[in-house]
Image (tube, coloured by chain):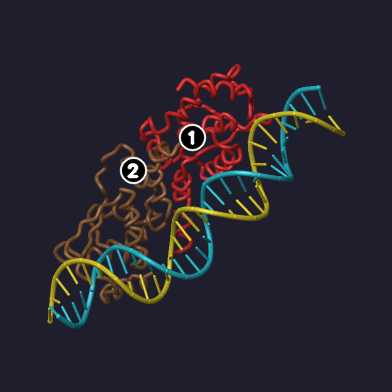
Chain colours: A red, B brown, C cyan, D yellow
Amino acid sequence: MHKSAYMNMKKYIDIFRSLSDKTRLRIIRLLIQAGKELCVCEIMDSLQESHYNTSRHLKELKNSGLVKENKVGRWVLYSLTEKSEEFQGHIIHAVEGIPKDVFVTDCNRLKIRLSLRKEGKCVIGLKSPEWEKVIKQVRVKK
Amino acid sequence: MHKSAYMNMKKYIDIFRSLSDKTRLRIIRLLIQAGKELCVCEIMDSLQESHYNTSRHLKELKNSGLVKENKVGRWVLYSLTEKSEEFQGHIIHAVEGIPKDVFVTDCNRLKIRLSLRKEGKCVIGLKSPEWEKVIKQVRVKK
DNA sequence: TTCATATATGCACTTTTATGCATATAATAA
DNA sequence: TTATTATATGCATAAAAGTGCATATATGAA
């Protein structure tokens, strides 16, 4: 195949590739569920992933064009990009079409994490003792 | 993340992964374009890929559930599976949403290759001198 | 049964990818 | 300016993936 033909295709391949990883798929589904901007620490706490991983996967999703960032002071807020192309719209619909129960634990943690916002903003940052306390209680309840 | 949660997700990740490769994406688009079963040699000639690669990628697409096979004698015919799940329907729509020009060369070759069928069946097999002759003429015309 | 042919697969090699650790950057607060 | 903190990135490592070559399987024809 010619290189130019591959370059035309690359954009779409990159989007599929960016969703072929469990952490990135979880991030996208989390952003769909949230329906608003989330900061990195909210995402990492919801997924219970390390901050390094979360950050890097977010960057990949940004590179593929599925996600955009909005820098506010030292906080970086991530959200889904507007569906500019037909293709991207179908992709997001596809992720929405995955049964809810697959992501239920992440979404529950997100709900709790978002309840700790003050005036609509995340204020507790990463490795927060407050979050540790709250999430530990949830585990005990099970 | 728990292993069971990953297993729930794996099916969807595998489908995204299966489309994150140029050869497999081209195969899927070719099958969409054809709208009918294609044999391995028709696919490899349309893509101008080696038979080894074509065969292996078809197997991966079969494993992910996007493609099914129908064995007729020593010919194996491949086609898209019926869209049993909402998710899969969106995925195929997404591939359909990729601009036509990205795959135009493959589709042109497919058209020529299908014109060599007799009574709706592929009869010329692989490394066919007939195909080599026809496709060489197309190249000269450019 | 033997040969030809359509398709599949094991092995080796190279490249890519995911992840953890440590560290760097950048912005706010003191 | 200095310290703190939210986020990003380089390095190393291990696992996975794509491809070519050779070979195996399986079906139909002679």
Q: Is residue B52 above or below residue B96?
A: below
Q: Is residue B123 above or below residue B28?
A: below
Distance between mark 2 and mark 1 Cα atoms: 18 Å
Badge count: 2
Q: Residue at x 48, y 49 (%)?
A: A14
Name the residue that disc number 2 marks: B93
> Alpha-carbon neighbours of circle 2 within 10 Å: few (<14), some, or many (≥20)?
some
SS under mark 1: loop
Q: Give the image location of residue B119, x and y in percent.
A: 14, 64
SS under mark 2: helix
Q: Chain of mark 1?
A: A
Looking at the rendering, in which quadrant would you find the C terminus of chain A?
A: top left
* A80 relative position to B31: left or right: right
| Whether residue A38 is visible | yes
Q: Residue at x 32, y 42 (%)?
A: B88
Q: Give the image location of residue A70, x and y in percent.
A: 60, 33
Q: Chain of mark 2?
A: B
Q: Which mark is on residue A82?
A: 1
Outermost residue on the top side: it is: A119
Question: Does the CB distance between marks 2 and 1 fall below 8 Å?
Answer: no
Q: Residue at x 39, y 41 (%)?
A: B7
Q: Residue at x 39, y 58 (%)?
A: B23
Q: Give the image location of residue B70, x and y in percent.
A: 20, 56
Query: Mark 2 is on which residue type?
Result: His
Query: Mark 1 is on which residue type?
Result: Glu
